[in-house]
Amino acid sequence: MTWVWVAVAGALGALTRYGVGVAIGPQVFPWGTWAVNISGSFLLGLVLTLGTRLPDHVTTAIAVGYIGAFTTYSTFSWELFTLGRTDRLLVASAYLASSVVLGILAAALGYRLGRLLQS
């Protein structure tokens, strides 16, 4: 039954990601992908930290289904490649550095919030 919850949550995550992309629209800097990956890192840190208090199928549905479909490494990679291919190296460098550093910090913040909520 967990697979059904993962599928439903994945559909919702994909729709949310699509909505963010539509709301932000095309930009010089890929803000849509950047926003979903940073916020998804935060959410994953939070959910996996709180996962010990949730039923396994709920944690799996949220982490694998919703957040897995919401965030996107493949689009990040393609956008980064395209920025480099089109000689926008400064934007590519800022995108790469900010995505990695802020993603890790967001995951750590989600973890810390999860630990506080567990207290």
Image: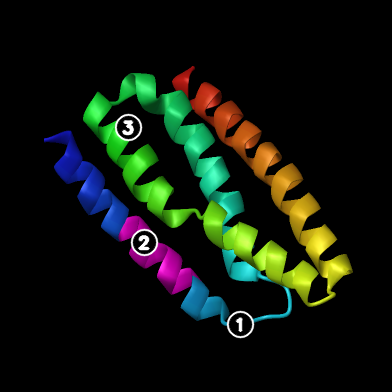
Percent from the top left, x then y, of residue 116? 54, 24
Looking at numbered disc 2 in the image, what kind of residue is underneath it?
Ala
Q: Which residues lie in the magenta part?
A: 12-20
Pointer 1 local density, CA inside 10 Å: few below 14, some 14–19, many at least 20: few
Percent from the top left, x then y, of residue 114? 51, 28
Q: Residue furthest left?
A: 1
Residue name at image x 42 percent, y 70 percent: 18
- Give the quadrant of residue 103: top right
Tell me the CA gap for discs 2 and 1: 18 Å
Left or right, 11 with reference to 95: left
Pointer 2 local density, CA inside 10 Å: few below 14, some 14–19, many at least 20: some
Which residue is denoted by mark 2 in the rendering?
A: 14
Who comes first in sequence, dot 3 or dot 1? Answer: 1
- Assess whether residue 18 is covered by the magenta stretch: yes
Looking at numbered disc 1 in the image, what kind of residue is underneath it?
Pro
Query: Residue 75: which numbered mark, if any?
Result: none
Tell me the CA gap for discs 2 and 3: 17 Å
Q: Foreground: 63 or 78? A: 78
Looking at numbered disc 3 in the image, what kind of residue is underneath it?
Thr
Which residue is denoted by mark 1 in the rendering?
A: 26
Which residue is denoted by mark 3 in the rendering?
A: 59
Residue name at image x 31 percent, y 34 percent: 60
Residue name at image x 83 percent, y 59 percent: 93
